[in-house]
Amino acid sequence: MRYLFLITLLFSFFSCQSKIESVEEATPEVKKPRTIVTTDGEIDDVDSFIRMLLYANEFRIEGLIYSSSMWHYKGDGKGTLFTSEMEMTKTMYGAKTDLRWPGVEWMNPLLDAYEVVYPKLSQHAEGFPTAVYLRSVVRVGNIDFEGEMEVDTEGSDFIKAKLLDEDMEPIYLQVWGGTNTIARALKSIEDQYKGTAEWESIYKKVIDKAIIYAILDQDATYRKNIAPNWPDLKIYYNASQFWCFAYPWKRAVPESQQYLFEGKFMGDEIINNHGPLLKQYYSYGDGQVQAGDDEHIHGDPTKLVNAQWGTFGVYDFISEGDSPAYLHLIDVGLDNLNQPQWGGWGGRLVQSAEQPNRWEDGKAVLDYNPFTDTLDATYPQIRWIEAIQQDFAARADWCVMDYADANHPPVVKAVGGTRLSAKLGKKLSLEVQTSDPDGDQVETKFWIYKEVGTYTGEVELSANGNQVEVGLDAKAIGQLHVIAEVKDNGVHPMTRYVRFVIEV
């Protein structure tokens, strides 16, 4: 009988193992998003670049490409005069042989400094790429003039190869300057394949994997070249929400949260005493000057009054207008990567009715701003500012501290599913599990992201720790988004989320 029992036990064990393995094999591997950055090297690009390096474990950086824009171009070295196609810079600058060009070396000292802090960073999270790898994906793209896309360059060829490779994971093309180097890559693909038997499959491959995330239009190549020839190519277009991370941040950020951008916080918690990488972060009055850009006077401590943007203090934040392009890629639990209309750390973009391949912000994307008691086109980004800035400060500590001395994000998971259905007037219970790798206490808050859903009825939330009871209206239907927000009590509190989506 004992042997029969053992045989039965072994059979059950191997049967369970087989089931477990088959389940694991059936579960698709969650891959970090692929991305390529194109940048014109403005000072706010440098600051966005530095912050991005502290998050380089959160996505796969597959290219770092120098490009040009309406604000920055090298010139052809022949004295050729160029006049901008964009009305603002055409009026401001007229005909120029070159414009505020920071060169194609500015990434080098940043990657050198990243190499110095890499051993510390790697203690805190897996997946940080080496500086050697990052240097290997740097390329120079189309830089001679704004919108220049007449010739293939190392940068455009690099993007072309990525768009045509066999990895069909989406690749996010971040546009921190103009779209011209991306436009050239696409033009080169057209030149090679259009009119051939392969064109239909090549076109489909590119539109299935490429997603452009653009901060404004900084040249005319998207409008004139990409949109007409690649009408199905996805683009996320941020023209309103990025301003709270850009030069006029004082106009957008609520006064009670401006301390997160002021010199006391930026200088003490991020820039100073946090290693050689963050020491290169540009801020007001810091004495730094970017070579090649004669308009970069922000570091001069005698010129802290800016007629356009306001009065600033030493180490005040200048701008990181391009950071939303990669903040969108960071998985903090908001499930926004493939649903930009749901909102996340990179803001909220909705699908255009006229161009279904285009997601954009603006007047159609307004969140209620409790600080101003108005519907606000910038609040879809502002609502995350405190969590984003505190997270940045915590990661700044990672550059110089051992794991035991720094803060790390809490872990939050849903108990059960996050996509639910419910009937009119019913109550349902939602629950999350939380923990903290540092043993910190965590606080869980539940709130409704009303603007994202289509549910218009009254909702009653009754929270008790990690559980909340959701009471639904007896007359309303639609989609309801309930956010579980979990924050630790570390020196720089870090926040993570679970989004529950309820179809009523």
Image: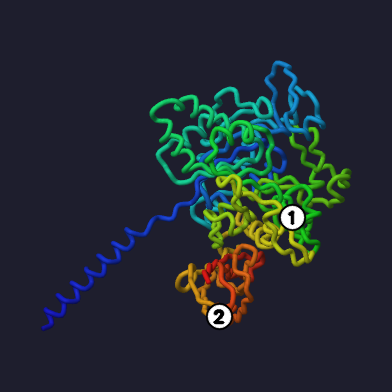
Q: Position of residue 241 (x, y in %)?
A: 70, 52
Q: Residues within 10 Å of mark 2 (few under 14, many from 20)?
A: some
Indicate whether 64 appears above or below 483.
above
Seen from the viewer's position, the closer of residues 108 and 375 is 375
Marks 1 and 2, the one that precedes in the sequence: 1
Identify the secondary structure beneath mark 1. Answer: helix
Q: Residue at x 61, y 58 (%)?
A: 343
Q: What separation in Å lies between label 1 and label 2 (alpha carbons)?
A: 48 Å
Q: Residue at x 80, y 26 (%)?
A: 94
Residue where numbered disc 2 is placed: 425
Q: Position of residue 69 (x, y in %)?
A: 68, 33
Q: Residue at x 59, y 42 (%)?
A: 174
Seen from the viewer's position, the closer of residues 190 and 31 is 190
On screen, residue 247 versus residue 465, left or right, reads: right
Residue where numbered disc 1 is placed: 266
Labels 1, 2: front one: 2
Amino acid type at mark 1: Met
Q: Is residue 116 visible?
A: no
